[in-house]
Image: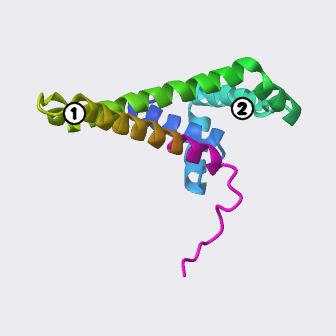
Amino acid sequence: MLTPGDKERFQVLLMKAVDAELSTTEQSEFDQFIRSHSECKSEWEEFKKLNNLTGGIHMKLPDQEKWDQYWMNIYNRLERRTGWILLSVGLIILLSTGGFYAIRGFLLNPDIPMLEKLGLSAFFLGSAVLIVSVLREKLTLRKSDKYKDLVRLFI
């Protein structure tokens, strides 16, 4: 009968044996478990069968044509565009809110004309939209930038 410590050690060795990662000393220790304990031997036999069954399974990747067809699907394009729109709107709201809190004292001051308040608000809102737009464009073009590996020298 295996003690709890021996059982735990056998489990560690069993996992290494399944992955073919046993050192020579571990292999001899593992073989000793197999020879001495019938439950260890039967467990090892089950794992070998399972490993043989799953070892032959390979995932077949779709052809490039299938991937192209997938991305041409309207749902997938709509899903991606909706994600970009929601991300952009969320960032614009966050940046605008941050700008509002930064200039809240200015906007809430009754002595400042409404036109100046509207102008400053438009400036911050426009800045938020442009920041998000530039970030999105840079992220999108980063994958296909043919000049990304060039070293730019400033003389």
Q: Residue at x 47, y 41 (%)?
A: 130
**126 horizontally vs 97: left or right:** right
Residue topped by disc 1:
101
The answer to whether residue 1 of the structure is visible from this angle is no
Q: Quadrant of residue 126?
A: top left
Could you classify mark 2 by the number of other residues whose Cα lies within 10 Å: few (under 14), some (14-19), or many (20 or more)? few
**Residue 121 position (above or below residue 79):** below
Residue 147's x, y, as percent? 68, 62
Q: CA distance from mark 1 to mark 2?
A: 61 Å
Residue 73's x, y, as percent? 78, 21
**Residue 23 position (above or below residue 58):** below
Residue 30's x, y, as percent? 58, 43
Going by the numbered disc 1, the residue's amino acid type is Tyr
Going by the numbered disc 2, the residue's amino acid type is Asn
* Relative depth, front residue between 118 and 104: 118
Residue topped by disc 2:
51
Residue 142 within the magenta-colored segment of the rendering: yes
**Residue 2 position (above or below residue 79):** below
Q: Name the mark nearer the viewer: 1 or 2.
A: 1
Q: Residue at x 75, y 19 (%)?
A: 74
Q: Quadrant of residue 69?
A: top right
Residue 40's x, y, as percent? 58, 30
Helix, strand or loop status at disc 2: helix
Q: Residue at x 58, y 77 (%)?
A: 153
Q: Which residues are magenta?
A: 135-155
**Residue extending farthest top:** 75
